[in-house]
Amino acid sequence: MPPPPAPSLDALAADPGRVAALAPEAVPPLLAQLAALQSAITARLLGVASPEASPGRDPAEDRPLTVPEVALHLQVGKAYVYDLIRRGELGALRFGKYVRVPPAALREWEARHQEKALDRGAYRVYIPSVKGRSHERRRTPAHS
């Protein structure tokens, strides 16, 4: 004969005396449910929205990013990301030796840099000296 089903948390809260009759294998799932409930109640007490409160929102989206993750996202080197943080251009959280970038700070940095056009100072106007005296203007990189 199969063991009787474990009582719910509601039933145990209504009659705590039933805990003594619980089968040992029924305890871990109840403790997991209780821990999840305690976390949700604590978050509510602190005014933090739980992931369940905002459907469709992935809690991993709000997880601070490591410098290598930001570098991979921006397709730049880690040293450049550290330089952005050091110059105060990219917001970061520091705790001990760890540096993390909040996703909101990365989105703000990207928004500020999407609006900028290519730097015109990086190019110079080149007028070739052709015997036909063409005054055609071509833009070439100013690397030389």
Image (cartoon, helix red, strand yellow):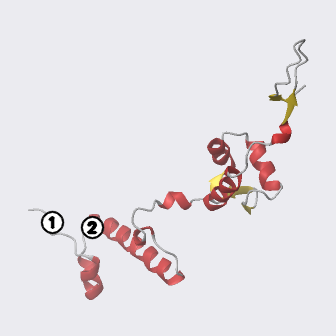
Task: From the viewer's side, name the closer residue of 10 and 5.
Answer: 10
Q: Residues within 10 Å of mark 2 (few under 14, many from 20)?
A: few
- Which residue is at the front of the view, 137 or 142? 137
Indicate left or right for 10 with 5 as reference.
Answer: right
Q: Where is residue 21 in the image (x, y as percent from the top left)?
A: 23, 77
Compared with residue 88, is residue 133 higher up or lower down, i.e. above or below? above
Above or below: residue 24 compared with residue 134: below
Instruction: Name which residue type carries label 2.
Output: Ala
Q: Residue at x 88, y 20 (%)?
A: 128
Q: Mark 1 points at which residue?
A: 3
Labelled disc at residue 62? none
Q: Residue at x 52, y 81 (%)?
A: 47
Q: Earlier in the sequence, mark 1 or mark 2?
A: 1
- Residue 26: which disc? 2
The spot of residue 113 in percent (x, y) is 71, 51
The residue under the point 81% across, 41% down is 120
Quadrant containing the N terminus in the rendered view: bottom left
